[in-house]
Image (cartoon, helix red, strand yellow):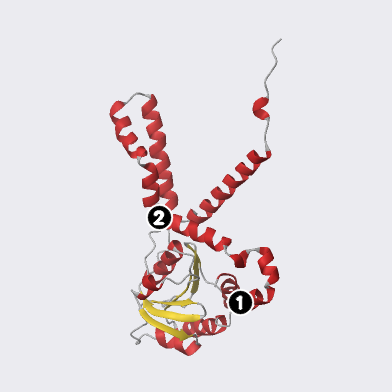
Amino acid sequence: MHNVDFSFLHIRLLDIVDILLVAVIIYYIYNLIRGTIAVNILLGLIIIYLTYLIVKQLHMQLLTQILGGFTSVGFIALIVVFQTEIRRFLLLLGKNATLKNISWWSFLFRKNNEESSNPAFIKPVIDACKSMKNSRTGALIVFAKYFDEQYYQNSGEHMEAHISKRLLESIFQKNSPLHDGAVVIADGKIKCASCILPLTDNENLPLQFGLRHRAGIGISEMSDAVAVIVSEETGEISYAKQGRVKMNVSFAELENLLNKDA
C-alpha cells in the first residue's frame, strides 16, 4: 500500500507572511487604479497575454511571434503605461514610511501631531468656498503635501502668501488675471496661483465636468495632492482624491476631508 505524500501541505510562517504581503500589495494597487482608465489598460494587457498563451498552444507561428515580441518587453511597457500609478504608489509608500506616521513617534510627539491635525488655514478656505458657492465663482484649490517647486511654479505665478478668505476670493474673481488656473496650497501657505494642471484621461466622468474638474482629478491621479473644485455653473463643491471625485460635498464634510488629507 502506497503512502500518500502530504508534504506540499506543510506551510511555514514565512509562507503566510509572503501571502499577506502580496495581498496587501494587490490591495494598494487596486485602490490606486480603481475607477480610473488604468483598469481598462490593465484588462487589455491581460487579454493580450492570454491570447498569446492560446495562440502559442495552437502553434500559430505568426501571431505567436508578434504577441511574443510584445510580451517580451512587457515589464518596460508596464512602467511606461502605468507611470502615473507607479508614481502614486511610491508616494504612498514614502508617505506611510515617514517618521511622523510611526505610532511610537506619534506617541512621543503627540502634541505636535494634534496641532498639525487641525490646520488653521482650513477655516479661511472653507469660508472662501462658501462665498464662491453663493456667487457661482469657479475655483480650483489644490492641497499638495509635497510641493514640487519646478513642477508647479513653471505653470503658474509664485506667491508664497498667507491664506485668507479675501485673497482666495480676489484670485478667483472673474476679472482677475490669476483666476484661470489652480491655486496650490502647501505648508500652510499659498505657494502659487494660475497653475495649469494635467487633465485626467478618465472617460467615465459626468458630462457636466469641465476643464476645472478634469484638472483637479488629473493632479490627484499623478500625485498625493487633493483638490477642491467649485463649479462656476452650479456652485456645487467637489472633492478629488486619488483620481476619484466626490460631488456635492457639504461644508461640514469638506472640513472633515481637509482635516484628514490636507
Which is more toward the observer, 181 or 9? Answer: 9
The residue tagged 1 is 116
Is residue 211 placed above or below 122 in the rendered structure? above
Quarter assignment of residue 214: bottom left
Residue 107: image tag: none
Crowd tier of the residue under label 1, counting other residues whose Cα lies within 10 Å: few below 14, some 14–19, many 20 or above: few
**Disc 2 residue type (three-letter):** Gln
Q: Is residue 190 above or below residue 241?
A: below
Q: Residue at x 41, y 52 (%)?
A: 82
Q: CA distance from mark 1 to mark 2?
A: 31 Å
**Left or right of 10 on screen, residue 53:** left
Label 1 SS? helix
The quarter in which the C terminus is drawn is bottom right
Callout 2 crowding tier (Cα within 10 Å): few <14, some 14–19, many ≥20? few
Residue at 46% from the left image edge and 81% from the top image edge = 190
Q: Amino acid at mark 1?
A: Ser
Q: Furthest residue to the bottom? A: 166
In the rendered image, residue 46, in percent from the top left (x then y), is placed at 43, 41
Where is residue 48, by image quadrant? top left
Q: Is residue 91 shown above or below 176?
A: above
Q: Is residue 225 left or right of residue 73?
A: right
Q: Are marks 1 and 2 in contact (CB under 8 Å)?
A: no
Q: Nearer the viewer, residue 57 or 108?
A: 108
The N terminus is located in which quarter? Answer: top right
Q: Residue 72: x and y, percent?
A: 36, 38
The quarter holding residue 168 reads: bottom left
Specify the label residue 83 is tagged with.
2
Q: Is residue 209 visible?
A: no
